[in-house]
Amino acid sequence: MNRQYSFIIVLSLLSWIMVSCQGFEQHIERSPSNNDFTDRVDSLVISTMNRYNIPGLAIGLVSGDSIRYAKGYGIKTIQDTLPVTEFSNFHTASISKLITAQAIMMLVEENRISLDDRLPARVPNLRYSDKRVEEITIRQLLNHTSGLPDVSSYEWGNNHQSDRSLEQYVLSLNLKPEMDPSSQYHYSNLAYNILGYVIERVTGTSFELYVKEHILDPNGMSGSDFRYYLIPDSLRTSPHSKNWLTGNVYVRKTYPYTREHGASSTLNSSASDLSKWMISFMESMIANNGENVFTQMTQPDFRAYPYIGLGFQLGTLESRATIGHYGGDKGYRSYLLMIPEEETGLVLLANCDYNEDFRQEILHPLAGLMLKNN
């Protein structure tokens, strides 16, 4: 009897899920233009969005000192029909690390910090149960060779907003490396959260305020902020996932934000703003004939794993060196890619977290198209 009752409950629950999860099907129609480049970009983006059922997406394409193309596609949330634009805001996830790394290197350039500084010297009240923590340097935090573990649970539902959130988080940790520092590459969001606190200690201001005043605002990124609660409603998008049972797309109840993970993950930005940042960063790289800390960020920094710089993920495309970063969190996927020798940059932001290969399926052909049209 109990078994039969349980079966009825399960069957009822499945029926409820099938009925209540309203299916979303993306079907964007392309409007032809008189510009061949625009047509080819739109055709690729729209066909991919329709194929993978992506609610909303924005791209920014940069050539030299100008934004060649920036556009939004689809909708901010499947709960209404508000369109995505090039100014719409997305949770960029690990693209955030590029801004954090840049902030650290700016402090290096000002001789306020050294890449060889040991972590306990910069955070003297840090708790740890393993003496190997005393060997960890700023450089190792930047290139993911500190040996520290990754974050096991982000607890986005905390939605902490206090100025002391990062400090309380870092000082509550009892650090224990999983391997010897500099022994191997091991991706760690925790390392970048700690770098955010190092910035706070060195500058005497919050991590978010420092990068806002020294990186975001100077680059005209007025719609961007690491503090999600300061993003205007008019710019926000919603996170989307797929129901594992029905395959239907749904809006996630929790936005991926809590302040202690800011330095690793919570930059909220747009295709337009990140295009401005790419232009500025590539211009910074050529200062002093390329002999500067920003160019240093883009060079292989760990011999055993030559695909990581100081913050940047490194690769090749069309036989050219690339720098950038992938991003992914609950409800969002992103990808920023630059080809410095061609002064070319591309960024893609999307408000869904499934079929994530669409990022390179869109950006890599677009990069090839841009290189042919430069």
Image (cartoon, grey):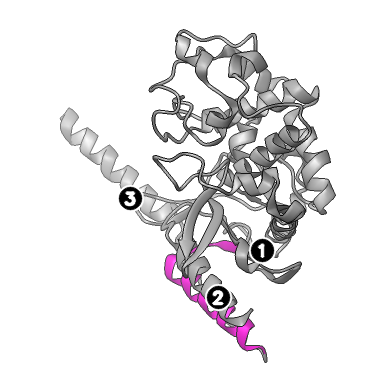
Q: Which mark is residue 84?
A: 1
Residue that badge 3 annotates: 245
Q: Residue at x 67, y 18 (%)?
A: 167
- Disc 1 residue type (three-letter): Val
Label 3, label 2: how far apart the Cα atoms are: 26 Å
Name the amino acid type tagged 2. Answer: Ile
Mark 1 touches mark 2? (CB < 8 Å): no
Stretch in magenta: 35-57
Q: Residues within 10 Å of mark 1 (few under 14, many from 20)?
A: many
Residue 11: percent from left, percent from top: 27, 45
Picture coordinates of residue 191, whole percent (x, y): 54, 28
Image quadrant where residue 13 sits? top left
- The residue singled out by tag 2 in the image is 28
Give the vertical position of 225 relative to 365 (above or below).
Answer: above
- The answer to whether residue 302 of the structure is visible from this angle is yes
Residue type at mark 3: give it.
Leu
Say which element carries label 3: loop
User: Looking at the image, is mark 3 or mark 2 nearer the viewer?
Assistant: 2
Tags 1 and 3 touching, CB below 8 Å: no
Q: Is residue 178 magenta?
A: no
Q: Contact (CB < 8 A) between labels 3 and 2?
A: no
